[in-house]
Amino acid sequence: MLTILGFAMIATFLVLIMMKKMSPIAALVLIPALFCVFVGKGAKLGDYVIDGVTSLAPTAAMLMFAIVYFGVMIDVGLFDPVVRGILKFAKADPMRIVVGTAILAAIVSLDGDGSTTFMITVSAMYPLYKRLKMSLVVMTGVAAMANGVMNTLPWGGPTARAATALKLDASDIFVPMIPALAVGLLGVFVLSYVLGKRERKRLGVLTLDEILVDEKAGEKVEETETVLVGAGGSGSGSKTPVATGGSGSGTDAEDEAGDAARFQVLDPNRATLRPKLYWFNALLTLTLLTAMIMEWLPIPVLFLIGAALALTVNFPHIPDQKARLAAHADNVLNVSGMVFAAAVFTGVLQGTGMVDHMARWMVDVIPEGMGPHMALVTGILSLPLTYFMSNDGFYFGVLPVLAEAGAAHGVTPLEMARASLVGQPLHMSSPLVPAVYVLVGMAKVEFGDHTRFVVKWAALTCLIILGAGILFGII
């Protein structure tokens, strides 16, 4: 009976959030609470929740302060020179532009937010793609795959969810996975090089003077760098670019104005810039990432200290600090709220014994020969499952069951958690990921076209990560 109720609870949760009948936070709380009553253990719901919240508090703190920290770094202009450098590197060579897209998306993905990554990447690269008449699905596909690999960062979401669901430390999951993820990211760069060579063969290589022409007026833009800086939103020039929107065809004034509005993500004149503190912020970020990898302190403590330093040094006045916190409050609330809501789901699933019964059932149905290879099975299953369901559904609904089944065959929860991250490059193009609509919307690409292009390449990237993980003995 508990097996049936457990699967029914997971199915109900998945259906409601996939059909958008309930928000993930509401579903994580209300559905398990209801099933806890069905099981006859409603009186113990409070104990389950308190135990879950206590164990998840460090993960929630890590996510909260990581979002604040990287949000502040974007505000103060830490990534602006990176955008300028990539634009200068790309020039008018299609191959360099595609590789630059992958590099930029990977770097900006350090903030852990896909929407921010796509806004910055498309803002910088879209005008070049339009001027050269390059394939825009190449841009969206490469950006999505690079972000998918980087999305496995502990503050990106999947790793935190896996740690939350299996009650593990996020650093124990992520740090050993770095070599495999590095191979996956290298695979994305190699793929971007191949796709860029294909675009170069199709289009050739032009000079900036040849491409930066206002097609509507038929006149060359006077200052090349002004156009690039305006389009990328990261330069220091104050002139208004002639073709800020990067429209490659003679669109009307209203469309150009709409494009211009979209390409001000990194406004070079925004009030939050702190150019005099650039090297302090760069050193602080480098130190923070080094400390995380070397495990000098727990990750939540590192980001708590880092966020406090970043706010205090860059915005010494209290009203300014409040304004920065308010600017990132939505992301903080959504992510941390999700973690605490997950305490109800995982607490009920485990406290009532449903997960144990489901695991035993899965152990019985999985062929005996596959039991010791449950990590490999989980890695392969993560591709379709994280594509056709949300990360919440997979990590909170499916992974605990797979982990229990793996434990029966001697596979550790850490191996299962690492294997569960393999499908993220494909997941980032899932129709259930809101950020992908930001990507295709700003790039003016049909979602179907993006999907047809990216699925095969993203799946290949996932398999490269899985193969590297097995080769290095990580999974």
Image (tube, grey):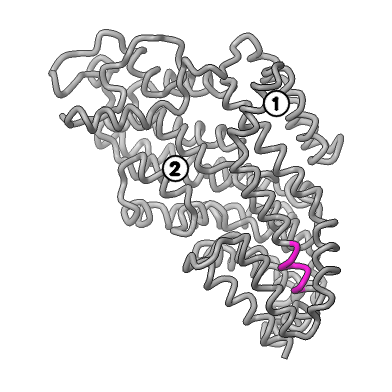
Residue 348 part of the magenta segment: yes
Residue drawn 79% across the image and 78% down it: 42
**Circle 1: element type:** helix
Which sits in the foreground, 105 or 311? Answer: 311
| Quadrant in which the C terminus is drawn | bottom right
Q: Neighbour class for label 1 at 10 Å: few (<14), some, many (≥20)?
A: some
Q: Amino acid at mark 2?
A: Val
- For disc 2, the neighbor class at 10 Å (few under 14, some 14 to 19, many from 20) is many
**x and y percentages locating residue 152 in the rendered image:** 64, 48
Is 228 contained in the magenta span?
no
Q: Nearer the viewer, mark 2 or mark 1?
A: 1
* Amino acid type indicated by mark 1: Thr
Q: Residue at x 70, y 66 (%)?
A: 375
Secondary structure type for disc 2: helix
Determine which residue is flagged by label 1. 285
In the image: residue 448, left or right of residue 215: right
As displayed, is residue 352 above or below residue 403?
A: below
Horizontal side, residue 369 vs residue 87: left or right: right
Q: Over which residues does the magenta segment extend?
A: 343-349
Is 325 situated left or right of 18 in this image?
A: right
Which residue is outermost to the bottom? 1
User: Looking at the image, is 116 positioned above or below residue 358?
Assistant: above
Residue in the picture at 80% in, 51% down:
57
Mark 2 to mark 1: distance in Å?
25 Å
Q: Is residue 365 visible?
A: yes
Rendered location of residue 255, percent (x, y): 23, 33
The residue that mark 2 highlights is: 142
